[in-house]
Amino acid sequence: MVRMRKSWREKLHDSKDLPRVIEINDKMSKRWGTGTCVIPAPIEVDEAMRSVPEGRLVTINRIREFLARKHGASIGYPITTGIFCNIAARAADEDVGEGKKEFTPYWRTLKSKGELNEKYPGGVEAQASRLQVEGHTIEPGRGKKPPVVRILKRCWWRFDKHIN
C-alpha cells in the first residue's frame, strides 16, 4: 500500500492533542529556567502569523511569548513553535500555488534577531523581496548569517493589543 505524504495544509490542521502545557523538567531548566512550557498547536501559530498586518513585523520569540501568555505558561516551546512557523509558511505556499487569494503572510515573521528565515519557501531571497514590497529595508548578513530587516520601532506588531 502506497502512503500519500500529508500536505502542508493537512500538517497545519493536525493538532496531535496540542496545545499542551507541561512542567519544565530538570533537563529543560538548564536552558529555560523553571515553570511551565506551552507546546502550541500548529494552527495557533498560523493564527498568530495571520494577525500581523502589512508593514508590521513579529519574531518567532514574540509569537512564543504571546502563546505562553494565552495559555498561562512561563514560556512557549521554541522548537515546535519554529517548526510550526515553517509548516504555516509551507501551507501558505501551497495556497498560493492553488491560486488562493487569502493566505498566511509568513514573510512578516522573522527569526529572533530580525533575521530572515532561510527555511521559508523561496529562502531568504523570496522573504526579502516580499518585505521590500511592504517598505522594509534589508541589510546583508555577516558571514554565514542570513540578512536582517532594519527594524523601525513602529514596525513591531503587538499581539496583546490585537488578538486574544
Image: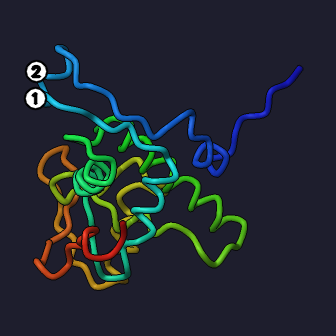
Picture residue at 40% right of the left edge, 74% below the top: 130
What residue appears at the point 56 percent right and 70 percent down from the top-left corner? 103
Task: Classify the position of the C terminus by image quarter.
Answer: bottom left
Label 2–label 1 contact, CB within 8 A: no
Q: Amino acid at mark 2?
A: Lys
- Which residue in the protein does label 2 denote? 30
Q: Quadrant of residue 79?
A: top left
Q: Position of residue 162 (x, y in %)?
A: 32, 76
- Decide: is 74 above or below 141: above
The Cα–Cα distance between marks 2 and 1, rounded to whole angstroms, is 6 Å
- Mark 2 lies on a secondary structure that is helix
Q: Residue furthest front?
A: 72
Q: Which residue is more in the foreground, 12 or 145?
A: 12
Picture coordinates of residue 12, whole percent (x, y): 58, 48
Q: Identify the coloring.
A: rainbow
In the structure shown, which secondary structural element does the residue marked by tag 1 occupy? loop
Out of 142 and 155, give the one closest to the viewer: 155
Tell me where residue 134 appears, x and y as whole percent. 34, 83
Figure quadrant of residue 59:
bottom left
Residue at image mark 1: 33
Q: Amino acid at mark 1?
A: Gly
Which residue shows up at 33% across the image and 68% down it? Answer: 128
Q: Which mark is residue 55?
A: none
On the rendered structure, is 25 left or right of 119? left
Q: Does residue 143 appear left or right of residue 50 in this picture?
A: left
Which residue sits furthest top?
26
The residue that appears at 56% across and 61% down in the rendered structure is: 92
Q: Left or right of 132: which side holds 119? A: right
Please state the horizontal and vertical placement of residue 156, each as a whole percent of the image: 20, 73
